[in-house]
Amino acid sequence: MLIGIVLLPMWGIALASGGNSFHEIAIQTGESVSLAPTGQFITMPTEISVYAAGIVSWLALFGLVGLLYAQLRYAHNVGRRGEPIVPDEGESLPHVPSFLETAHRRVVAYYPADAGLRGVWLVGLFTFLSVVFAALFAGEAFGLSRSQFLGFYGGLLAFSLSETVLMYYTHFMPTIEVAEDRDH
């Protein structure tokens, strides 16, 4: 909230005082040129000021932080969905690594992995999307117009790979809460 209160007036001033700060980029045109960086995929401006580019970068950064928060909330809610297995004092749980329980550390709650069909479908979906975006990225990288959608396909590839790992972690790994004695 505080960041928004500070940044919104700065962005307004930056956009208002930007003036004629556009840097023109020469784009090859003609029938013999197959590269069209501003064409056909989404409507893009051919010029952008450095001020507007900075604001778009900040908004993208806030969007990524919000996406990370949503993913962590999803993993927390789904990973702790069932009833935890709570050990009694001095009792150890089966299938828990021995290094988690020491003289100064104990397991407080153990949530077994869900390993349901929903998790299999989600991991399969994001694995399929990873393969598709990897193929599109490779086709764009090794094709004739080598920079048109590389960032877009690369970003979607990274997103689908991270979602594959998140879905596997959330649905097929147990959640273990550990309490540790501290001297402070």
Image (cartoon, rainbow, N blue to C red):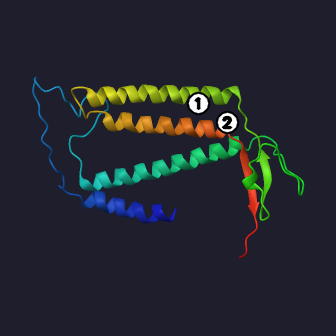
Q: What residue sits 60% from the left and 47% below the top?
A: 72
Q: Is residue 14 above or below residue 158?
A: below
The image quadrant that residue 112 belongs to is top right
Q: Relative to 135, is 38 on the left or the right?
A: left
Q: What residue sits 35% from the left and 54% below the top?
A: 55
- Which of the pair 84/25 is nearer the observer? 84
Q: Which residue is mark 2?
A: 172
Q: What residue sits 30% from the left and 60% below the top?
A: 14
| Residue at the farthest bottom position | 184
Element carrying mark 2: helix
**Which quarter of the image is occupied by the C terminus?**
bottom right
Residue 5 percent location from the top left of the image: 46, 64
- CB contact under 8 Å: marks 2 and 1: yes
- Which of the pair 112/55 is nearer the observer? 112
Q: Is residue 88 above or below residue 171?
A: below
Element carrying mark 1: helix
**CA neighbours of label 1 inside 10 A, class few (<14), some (14 to 19), many (20+):** many
Q: Which residue is mark 1?
A: 123
Q: Amino acid at mark 2?
A: Phe
What's the distance in space between the residues labelled 2 and 1, CA to CA?
10 Å
Q: Which mark is residue 21?
A: none
Q: Amino acid at mark 1?
A: Val
Whichever of labels 2 and 1 marks the residue nearer the N terminus, that label is 1
**CA neighbours of label 2 inside 10 A, class few (<14), some (14 to 19), many (20+):** some
- Which of the pair 49/63 is nearer the observer? 63
Q: Is residue 131 above or below residue 102?
A: above
Q: Relative to 135, is 88 on the left or the right?
A: right
Residue 121 percent location from the top left of the image: 62, 25
Residue 98 percent location from the top left of the image: 76, 52
Q: What residue sits 33% from the left and 38% below the top?
A: 151
